[in-house]
Image (cartoon, helix red, strand yellow):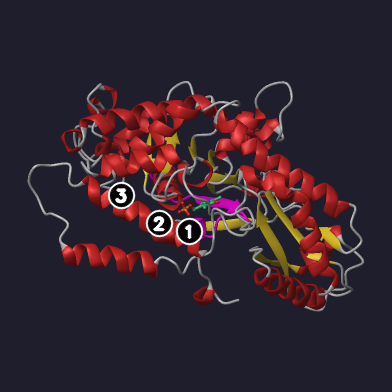
């Protein structure tokens, strides 16, 4: 099934139209300003029709990309605040939402174990990482930035943008940065910053942040943690019965900076990333004059510590309200993430026992990658693609991932390599509702694999 052919269920479209009508009836917030006239109303009707060409992201059978609807508190808070439309660049652009942003960012800092911090929300993880790399370059000019071979593709691009040398470190057979290769590279010298990933976008693999922190300390380099995807899983690393490997999460507090995306696992609408620095003094890098005073004063303008200028105050309000409603702890947001993680573990258990399916790696978070049993890498690719289409016709929406054949055969030595790359199936088991469909999912992928 092609993306342009997908369509939301009629009930979903009808519900969307219902929301549009109800909101139109509530009228404008202000006494003055434009009214919704007939032409505006027709545009909204047409929009609802146009929006029908979407995958059903909220349905548990959608288990493909990193996409799910926001929490109701988040979209209500975002919609309400957008009626005022504050801008979190300067304090007078939105005093209330600037305050909410500082409060919720302080909670993120606590989640990561930072005692002090300087940080703010951003419009995305890419921009948040750019900012961390820019600070790294300012502090360690003319030194190389290294990241893992499975790090997000934007690191390499942003290093080019910043005019700083970038090198990739190879991955181990679990898809994590190879720490021996990292140490060998640090020994050779010339590296200023190491970027580790906590939850790679492809496999959800956890780089060994605790080992990297030790190495960064020993070799005197900066450490940045890209936890855009997996940062909120810190909540599952707490307590006596952690649901994820706690060691890398507990080491985030030793890193110089960290990025986490509230618009991924923080249940927010798109447009909400964040970056935090352990040393508030990096704030002086943002300004040409008046270096330090802004950053210790209580009246901080968020725009003075951000690469971006305008940013939606509504995003800060939405994230703040969500954290207020759920709690940024194991029993709040953590409980929602735990359901996805448990569903991923249950799927992995079934696949491990299956004669027709294989796990690419043991899932460390809630991303599960599988491939059908076939003798050669090219047959595996063809089988995965066939499964992808067959499943889509049955309204199961997965994603595809391309990995290096020689890397996969480290775990599967009997697989014959006859292509450079091999395509596998990837599932983001990121909704609590996935817990209830584990058996149906495993049955569907098993049938599709037998037929691949
Ligand atoms: C998603 C992701 C990014 C990019 O974040 P955006 O919010 O999509 O810009 C960076 N790093 C990792 C590990 C990610 O998963």
Q: What is the x, y in percent for residue 143?
A: 48, 49
> Who's the residue at 36% across and 34% down the image?
282
Residue topped by disc 2: 16
* Residue 159 in view: yes
The mark nearer the N terminus, 1 or 3, is 1
Residue topped by disc 3: 22
Q: Residue furthest left?
A: 32
Q: CA distance from mark 1 to mark 3?
A: 15 Å
Q: CA distance from mark 2 to mark 1?
A: 6 Å
- The quadrant where residue 163 appears: bottom left
Question: Is 103 located above or below residue 311 in the figure?
Answer: above
Question: Is 69 located above or below residue 231 in the figure?
Answer: below
Q: What is the x, y in percent for residue 84?
A: 20, 41
Camera-nearest residue between 89 and 432: 432
User: Which span is picked out in magenta?
Assistant: 138-157
Question: Is 259 located above or below residue 296 in the figure?
Answer: below
Instruction: Tell me if label 2 and label 1 are in contact, CB under 8 Å.
Output: yes
Residue topped by disc 1: 12
Q: Is residue 244 left or right of residue 220?
A: right
Mark 3 is surrounded, within 10 Å at the Cα level, by few (under 14), some (14 to 19) or many (20 or more) other residues, namely few
Question: Is 106 located above or below residue 183 in the figure?
Answer: above
């Amino acid at each position: 099934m092609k993306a342009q052919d997908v369509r939301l269920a009629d009930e979903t479209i009808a519900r969307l139209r219902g929301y549009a009508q109800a909101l139109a009836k509530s009228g404008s917030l202000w006494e003055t300003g434009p009214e919704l006239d007939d032409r505006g109303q027709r545009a909204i009707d047409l929009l609802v029709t146009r929006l029908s060409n979407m995958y059903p992201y909220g349905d548990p059978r959608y288990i493909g990309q990193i996409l799910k609807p926001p929490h109701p508190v988040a979209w209500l808070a975002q919609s309400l605040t957008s009626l005022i439309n504050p801008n979190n660049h300067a304090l007078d652009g939105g005093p209330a939402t600037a305050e909410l942003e500082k409060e919720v960012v302080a909670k993120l800092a606590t989640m990561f174990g930072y005692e002090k911090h300087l940080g703010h929300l951003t419009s995305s993880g890419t921009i948040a990482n750019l900012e961390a790399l820019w600070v790294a370059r300012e502090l360690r000019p003319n030194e190389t930035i290294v990241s893992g071979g499975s790090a997000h593709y934007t690191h390499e691009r942003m290093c080019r943008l910043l005019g700083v040398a970038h090198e990739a470190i190879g991955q181990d057979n679990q898809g994590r940065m190879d720490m021996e290769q990292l140490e060998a590279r640090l020994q050779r010298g010339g590296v200023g910053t190491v970027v580790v990933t906590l939850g790679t976008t492809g496999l959800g693999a956890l780089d060994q942040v605790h080992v990297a922190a030790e190495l960064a300390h020993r070799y005197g380099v900066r450490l940045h943690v890209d936890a855009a995807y997996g940062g909120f899983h810190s909540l599952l690393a707490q307590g006596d019965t952690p649901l994820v490997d706690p060691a890398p999460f507990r080491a985030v507090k030793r890193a110089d900076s960290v990025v986490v995306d509230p618009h991924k696992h923080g249940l927010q609408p798109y447009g909400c990333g964040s970056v935090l620095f352990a040393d508030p003094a990096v704030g002086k890098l943002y300004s040409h004059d008046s270096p330090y005073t802004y950053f210790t004063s209580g009246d901080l303008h968020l725009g003075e510590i951000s690469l971006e200028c305008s940013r939606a105050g509504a995003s800060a309000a939405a994230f703040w309200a969500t954290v207020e409603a759920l709690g940024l702890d194991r029993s709040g947001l953590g409980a929602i993430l735990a359901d996805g993680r448990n569903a991923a573990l249950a799927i992995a258990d079934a696949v491990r026992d299956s004669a027709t399916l294989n796990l690419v790696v043991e899932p460390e978070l809630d991303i599960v990658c599988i491939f059908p049993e076939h003798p050669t890498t090219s047959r595996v690719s063809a089988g995965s693609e066939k499964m992808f289409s067959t499943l889509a016709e049955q309204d199961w929406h997965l994603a595809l991932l391309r990995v290096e054949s020689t890397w996969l055969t480290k775990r599967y030595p009997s697989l014959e390599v006859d292509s450079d790359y091999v395509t596998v199936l990837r599932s983001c088991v990121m909704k609590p509702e996935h817990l209830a469909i584990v058996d149906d999912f495993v049955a569907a992928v098993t049938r599709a694999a037998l037929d691949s």
